[in-house]
Amino acid sequence: MKSLGARNNVLVKIVSKGPLNILILFICAAWLIPSLGLFVSSFRPAHLILSTGWWRAFKTPFTFTLENYKKVLTTAGMGRSFINSLIITIPATVMPILIAAFAAYAFAWMKFPGRDFLFLLVVALLVVPIQMTLIPVLTLFNKLRLTGTFLGIWIAHTGYGLPFAVYLLRNFIGELPEEMFESARLDGASHYTIFLHLVLPTSIPALSSLAIFQFMWVWNDLLVALIYLGGNPTVSPMPLSISNLVNSYGAGWEYLTSAAFISMVLPIVIFFSLQKYFVRGILAGSVKG
Amino acid sequence: MNIKIVILAIGAVIGVPVILMAYIMFGERLIGKFKGKKRQAKIRPWFWLSPAFILLFVFLIYPVINTIILSFENANSTGFVGLKNYIFIFTSRATLIALKNNLLWLVFVTLVTVTLGLLIAVLTDRIKYESVAKAFIFLPMAISAVAAGVIWKFMYEFKPKGTEQIGTVNAVLSAVIPNFEPKAWLFNPPINTFALMIVYIWMWTGFCMIILSAGLKGIPDSLLEAARIDGANEWKIFWRIIIPTMASTIIVVATTMVINVLKIFDIVYVMTNGTLGTEVIANRMYKEMFNFRNYGRASAIAVILLIAIIPVMLVNIKRFGQKRS
């Protein structure tokens, strides 16, 4: 009796899971097809992109080409933009993390008047719309001649990234075991030693999450670059260059598809290889503004 | 390629951490020279906090105050105009369209992303290839809104009826619906606003799904098993157990989405630039700032965004205060 019931259960499960699987596969396909269409098209000759659907590329005769990538990297200047993106993103990722770690350490393990107030200020700044800062900062940058420079956009991204970085790291560093700090202090370790040899190494999970987050945020940013780099193509990162390409009527799909794909490669690789940390970062601070 | 720039970048990557660490090292030595542990402990925190707070002040605190002041001034910030900029925003046609659209975005996108995210989290919880399926949904989070704009512009591409459709949306609909009239999705209001929202939904559903899925895993299995033994069906379990226990997570996700959607800019800027009735507040602010050079109006628009976000800000502060006590 019992085994019959169990077998029935398995059967019921398989039959009832059929629609579920179909539904999930349908959702996955719907989510993947847009990117797939772009990817396939970026390898098709311009006249074919314009005359037939991208799904026809899988029918013989196969006509794939690397010509679009060659053209977009050289004549459309995407090669330059890719390098600009790297130059902007890497320092703009490193800088806020260390500065935030200092502040987070102070918030978590030092006592001072106004500590709670200042931390609540950071929490409040988390959600301040970046639009609230654009005009004063641009005016300031114009005066200091920082508009259109890498230096300007580095410190701008550092400033904007700080509330989230301080918030995330303060929560993590605050959870570290108190005994660890006490025994270090008994051994006569200075705050500098504790920070460098205890706090930073034990915070690597949080620092990695933060690094990925900030990297993605800066790499994919359009608004900050648009405002502070303006129309200077020699410093323009990929999203800014692509948005200019979209708005110029001369650019065809062969340029746009390949350019967009080049901009997606790095974040996608990071996403798949370090997904765990990315997800952790999202879960730790789902209040970013 | 400019060698100077590369050196500058490498210098920033290596030099900045070195300088910062040196700052702390020498600072600690300096503090050590002060007499008395109590005195040292009084100075020390400010020393560790100051790099962060100098930047926070320059890039967030001062600009917020300044923008509020600018919003009561004229186009080139030379004279006080009172509430004129705000009155303009709530009376001119162009900004009213933007306000109306933002409200539409807020309601529709938040509702769809959270519902869909929850649905997918619950569904994928029951299958073996959960992590793969979730990764596909989550993937668009890694893509810039600009690239997403290009991807979807291509999806929405339109050719007149009779010629072959190269846009996936029109091609699929033509294949499925007999006598379907292909549409220029981005050119016909009000459909075009919804077409833009779909791009945003495509990008952000994964975000909602990830947080909600983590919340779902936090529900103890024993609770669900007990309900099943009592004869509750899956539908009842969803409404009576999953939804109530996850209420706080759902609220957190929804408020995060509200904050994000409120500031919607890139997708609209890239795909339509707010033409043909698709304008939103942030894009309108960009136009006031750069196309019309009206800093007063642009600031007032930003202040309206801030005011809309203040309730969320207060809730966050309250939530954090509770967490500590």
Image (cartoon, coloured by chain):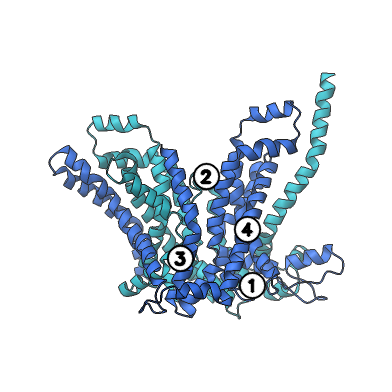
Mark 2, residue position? A283
From the viewer's side, name the closer residue of B102 and B58. B102
SS of the residue at dot 1? helix
The numbered mark at residue B303 is: 3
SS of the residue at dot 2? helix
Q: Describe residue B86's horizontal placement relative to residue A184 as left or right.
A: right
Q: Are marks 2 and 3 in contact (CB under 8 Å)?
A: no
> Which residue does the image show at 65% across and 69% down from the upper left?
B153
Pinpoint residue B96: horizontal percent, then vertical percent.
58, 72
Mark 1, residue position? A254
Circle 1 residues within 10 Å: few <14, some 14–19, many ≥20: many
Residue A264 visible in the current orientation: yes
Q: Amino acid at mark 2?
A: Leu
From the viewer's side, name the closer residue of B323 and B129. B323
Circle 4 residues within 10 Å: few <14, some 14–19, many ≥20: few
The colour chain B appears in is blue
**CA–CA distance in space, label 2 to label 4:** 23 Å
Q: Are marks 2 and 4 in contact (CB under 8 Å)?
A: no
Pinpoint residue A284: horizontal percent, then vertical percent.
49, 44
Q: Are marks 3 and 4 in contact (CB under 8 Å)?
A: no
Q: Are marks 2 and 1 in contact (CB under 8 Å)?
A: no
> Which residue does the image show at 65% across and 58% down from the upper left?
B108
Q: Describe residue B21's horizontal placement relative to residue B38 as left or right.
A: right
Mark 4, residue position? B107
Q: Is residue A21 above or below residue A217?
A: above
Q: Describe residue B155's horizontal placement relative to residue A274 as left or right.
A: right
From the viewer's side, name the closer residue of A200 and A111. A111
Q: Amino acid at mark 3?
A: Val
Pinpoint residue A8: horizontal percent, then vertical percent.
84, 28
